[in-house]
């Protein structure tokens, strides 16, 4: 077994947005990290709620939209009409599942499947609302409120789902994508993995899904969830490891495990429900150390700085 974190696992299950790229821009070092894993013989899979590519276009890519289409096909006759809200890729997944994608409630769809699409607008959302009111089962590929981008968070599929939720005054019948564990467990089963590692940037989807699947996970701080979110994370959204980016895969697991009892350069002293961070060094080390007290009951608002470097780190986290 290798002495770095990734060496302890036989499968790396990557999220895409916020981990490998931001919309259409690669995250620096991400491609090199993936290639290094391949060279080391680690199996790779991608499990994403929002994919602009068809599942068949990327090797071992599992998407919420693909699982949604397959799930619908298990419950309705072949060729059944399904109203599709989303990108052309989602229509393709529905078609590949043996169903007939339609665009109007007048086609009497048996289901509505809703996934992210940058061109989704009022007309198709109106048709979806009419179809659901008429009895169609409402499937959502995911409920991610935002998508990471180089310009900051953008509305995600969850924001589009919220439009229908408001209009219909109800929740979707089925939410397929993360944080449901199906993408993770399916990826592990296909790879015949005995020890998978899930890697993502969102606590509420990637990490919660991994926890639900009983898998170890790595949170990278290149996307949606930041240090303040991690400090406040409830038990079902706490990763096994945290790193600034994918380079953390090739450092010692002990340098990424969270929470940490001690780290080089930083100290935390606790007094009841208050804690003080002192020292200097790698901000991720400070984060790992502080998780030990915030996950044990210290409110994030009660963390104070005891050194100039600590004050700078906390300000950078918005604390």
Image (spheres, rainbow, N blue to C red):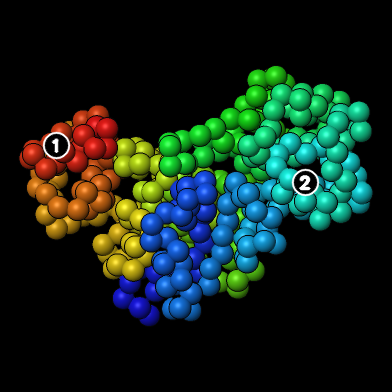
Q: Position of residue 266 (x, y in %)?
A: 13, 50
Residue that appears at 19% across and 41% down: 313
Quick one: label 2 or label 1, which is nearer the N terminus? 2
Residue at image point 92% right, 49% down: 79
Q: Nearer the viewer, mark 2 or mark 1?
A: 2
Looking at the rendering, which quadrant does residue 104 occupy? top right
Depth order, front residue of 30/115: 30
The image shows residue 98, relative to residue 159, as above or below, that is: below
Residue at point 19%, 53% (across, down): 282
Residue drawn at (34%, 62%) of the image: 247
- 50 sits to left or right of 233: right
Front position in the image: 287 or 212: 287
Residue 96 visible from this viewpoint: yes
Residue 311, disc: 1
Q: Which residue is mark 2?
A: 91
Q: Mark 2: give few (<14), some (14-19) or many (20+) Cα within 10 Å.
A: many
């Amino acid at each position: 077994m290798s002495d770095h974190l990734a060496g302890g696992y036989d499968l790396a299950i990557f999220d895409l947005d916020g981990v490998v790229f931001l919309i259409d821009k690669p995250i620096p070092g991400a491609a090199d990290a993936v290639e290094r894993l391949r060279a080391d013989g680690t199996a790779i899979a991608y499990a994403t709620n929002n994919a602009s590519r068809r599942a068949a276009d990327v090797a071992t890519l599992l998407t919420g939209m693909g699982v949604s289409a397959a799930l619908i096909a298990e419950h309705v006759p072949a060729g059944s009409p399904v109203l599709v809200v989303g990108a052309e890729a989602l229509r393709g997944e529905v078609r590949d599942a043996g169903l007939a994608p339609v665009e109007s409630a007048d086609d009497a769809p048996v289901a509505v499947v809703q996934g992210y699409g940058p061109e989704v607008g009022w007309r198709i959302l109106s048709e979806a609302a009419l179809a659901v009111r008429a009895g169609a089962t409402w499937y959502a590929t995911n409920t991610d409120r935002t998508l990471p981008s180089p310009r900051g968070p953008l509305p995600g599929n969850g924001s589009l789902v919220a439009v229908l939720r408001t209009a219909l005054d109800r929740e979707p019948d089925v939410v397929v994508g993360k944080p449901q564990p199906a993408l993770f467990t399916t990826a592990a089963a296909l790879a015949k993995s005995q020890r998978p590692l899930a890697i993502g940037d969102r606590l509420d989807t990637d990490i919660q899904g991994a926890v639900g699947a009983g898998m170890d996970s790595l949170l990278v701080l290149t996307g949606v969830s930041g240090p303040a979110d991690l400090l406040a994370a409830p038990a079902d959204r706490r990763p096994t490891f945290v790193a600034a980016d994918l380079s953390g895969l090739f450092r010692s697991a002990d340098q990424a495990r969270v929470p940490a009892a001690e780290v080089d350069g930083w100290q935390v002293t606790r007094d009841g429900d208050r804690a003080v961070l002192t020292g200097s060094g790698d901000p991720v080390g400070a984060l790992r150390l502080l998780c030990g007290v915030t996950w044990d009951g210290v409110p994030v608002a009660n963390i104070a700085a005891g050194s100039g470097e600590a004050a700078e780190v906390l300000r950078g986290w918005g604390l």
